[in-house]
Amino acid sequence: MRRTSDGFGGVVAELVKIRRLTDQEGQQLQRIVRRGSTNTVRYRRAMMLLASAGGNRVPVIAQLVQADEDTVRDVIHRFNQIGPACLDPRWAGGRPRLLSPDDEDFVVQTATTRPTKLSQPFTRWSIRKLLAYLRKVHGRVIRIGREALR
């Protein structure tokens, strides 16, 4: 809820409501909810928006879709800003890769080459030996952990 002043020093919560839906938006939301087999996130968000369009308040909608009230408010505000695009989740990208594709190719090439051909005193690579070799290759910085190498 957005809080506004009542003019007497108190604070009044402003109701969070969805903007008026276009016919196309309403049909799209109803289609998603009716099918129900679509992405769970899209389905729940469409339910929130339709419930809000039906005049339900945030606490009722949150109980209906088993979500936090702040989540319902965020979805409604986001729909009011960008429309149906808010139905699609925006997942975080995760940690950036430490290996470039070129480095990855080098690691694979090294791992598939016999150690004796690379002047190593053994005939088979172990994870530990391969990791040690990759870390001491001159002219290249290969940052890879043991599990990623596995």
Image (cartoon, rainbow, N blue to C red):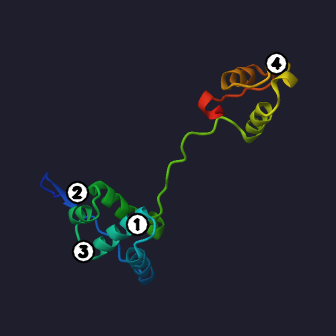
Decide: few, some or many residues near mark 2? Use Cα within 10 Å; few <14, some 14-19, many ≥20.
Answer: few
Residue 4 marker = 2
Sequence-wise, the earlier of marks 4 and 1 is 1
What's the distance in space between the residues labelled 3 and 4, CA to CA?
Answer: 74 Å
Residue 120 place in picture, x, y as percent: 81, 18
User: Which residue in the structure is indicated by mark 1?
Assistant: 79
CA–CA distance in space, label 1 to label 3: 16 Å
Single out the mark in the foreground, 2 or 1.
Answer: 1
Mark toward the start of the polypeptide (2 vs 3): 2
* Residue drawn at 25 percent across, 58 percent down: 1
User: Type of residue at label 3?
Assistant: Gly
The tag earlier along the polypeptide, 2 or 1, is 2
Q: In the depicted view, which residue is nearer to us: 120 or 77?
A: 120
Tell me the amino acid under the disc marked 4. Answer: Gln
Q: Which residue is mark 4?
A: 120
Residue 64, by quadrant, is: bottom left
Residue placed under numbered mark 3 in the picture: 55
Residue occupying image coordinates x 62% and y 28%: 146
Vertical relation: 7 (above or below) 46 = above
Local SS, label 3: loop
Q: Secondary structure at mark 4?
A: loop
Q: Which numbered disc, 4 or 2, marks the residue closer to the eye?
A: 4
Who is closer to the viewer here, 121 or 130?
A: 121
Nearer-the-camera pick, 19 or 120:
120
Residue 86 image position (x, y, % from top left): 45, 64
* Separation (CA) of disc 4 from disc 2: 73 Å
Q: Nearer the viewer, mark 2 or mark 3?
A: 3
Real-space CA distance between mark 4 and mark 1, rounded to the nearest whole angstrom? 61 Å
